[in-house]
Amino acid sequence: MASHFRSAERQGAEEETKLTAVSDEVTPQDEVVVPEAAAEPAIAEPMPEVAAEPAPEVAAPEPEAVHVVTASEPAETDQQPATESVYSSLAGDDAPAVQRTGTPTVSFKNVTLIYPAQPNKPALDDVSLDIYPGEFVFVVGHSGSGKSSLLRLITRELRATSGQVIVAGQDLTKMRNKKVPYLRRQIGTVYQDFKLLPDKTVYENVAFALECIGKPKSIIKAQVPEVLRLVGLADRMKHFPDQLSGGEQQRVSVARAMVNRPPLLVCDEPTGNLDPAISLGIMKLLDMINRAGTTVVMATHDREMVDSMRKRVIALEAGHVVRDQERGGYGYYGAL
Ligand SMILES: Nc1ncnc2c1ncn2[C@@H]1O[C@H](COP(=O)(O)OP(=O)(O)O)[C@@H](O)[C@H]1O
Ligand SMILES: [Mg+2]
């Protein structure tokens, strides 16, 4: 796992070294990626580190922090059974189970988060969990249950009030602010509202993410078209966001999140503004990115999607982890 992330120190020293989550080739700063290489997206290849990781022992889940409370209870909504779902094709039974061994990509140890505005109501209360390299994890729960807060601790937009948040072996509760940008370069983020720059084209929106971290033009010219091809937007590069559908805009934001090939992708309700048919395309994309080795943590309250995809599910209720289940479903929470 350590090879997926660079330490903050190494990042500073080796600014242009590519991460290995989606490609294990290391491209020096001034090397132009040849179009042939770009035409075959590295991201489509499963990562040997993840697939081949030896796993003599499967780490036990955190039994104290976890209990299955509702999985067998019936859903009260009119959602269709999984077999009827548009997401059925992503059921994932053919995906090899990720071995939970080695250093977790994300580790929460007794994490409590209290917003100053709500001192008596922790947004997260004594949360412990481990997410290993290559996992795809849904974080589910009611609105207000703490999903976004959990994700914002991973990106160090927030700092835990107590406990430890460890990402790639670094304790974010102790990390100095000046190191946070280096952490963020290794975490792609996708949000419900896309957050695209309206006066930049598709190409420029994605390129901007690389310009901000000082990538040379030669790298930008090679990587931006490559990632836009990957998300199916090769013919939309010159369009502006308002000329695109919602699904296309979200593809741009996925491209922007992935263009620097981060080993971890954090998505906060990325399909929240999209209808199911369009969401399916986004989920296929995230699934493909995950199968290529990127760890994906995604908050959602799309019950049908979670029930269909049979990924690991971490369920939150009022800031507590109430369930952590491999190949889980959404579970029963009453009206959401
Ligand atoms: N900036 C904030 N200031 C104060 N309370 C907040 C803030 N953001 C979220 N909260 C509270 O924290 C709890 C968890 O919110 P959030 O993490 O946004 O949940 P979710 O993403 O599951 O809807 C809620 O009670 C919410 O009101
Ligand atoms: Mg939220």
Image: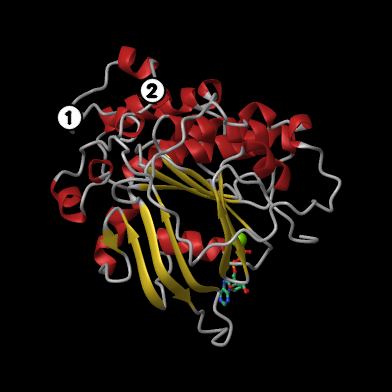
Residue 243 in view: no
| Vertical placement of residue 136 versus 152, above or below | above
On screen, residue 91 versus residue 82, left or right, reads: left
Q: Amino acid at mark 1?
A: Asp
Q: Residue at x 33, y 49 (%)?
A: 185
Q: Quadrant of residue 28?
A: top left
Name the residue furthest right: 78
Label 2 SS: loop
Give the image location of residue 234, x and y in percent.
51, 22
Of 144 and 92, nearer the camera is 92
Label 1 SS: loop
Ligand 1 shows up in the quarter that is bottom right
Give the image location of residue 46, x and y in percent.
38, 26
Quarter of the image for the N terminus: give it. top left
Name the residue furthest top: 36
Name the residue tied to disc 2: 45
Of 214 and 289, nearer the camera is 289
Please name the colour scheme applied to the rendered image. Answer: secondary structure
Q: Amino acid at mark 2?
A: Glu
Q: Quadrant of residue 309?
A: top right
Disc assigned to residue 30: 1
Disc assigned to residue 260: none
The residues bearing labels 1 and 2 have C-alpha atoms spaced at a distance of 24 Å
Q: Residue at x 48, y 75 (%)?
A: 113
Q: Residue at x 40, y 38 (%)?
A: 294
- Mark 2 is surrounded, within 10 Å at the Cα level, by few (under 14), some (14 to 19) or many (20 or more) other residues, namely some
Q: Quadrant of residue 121?
A: bottom right
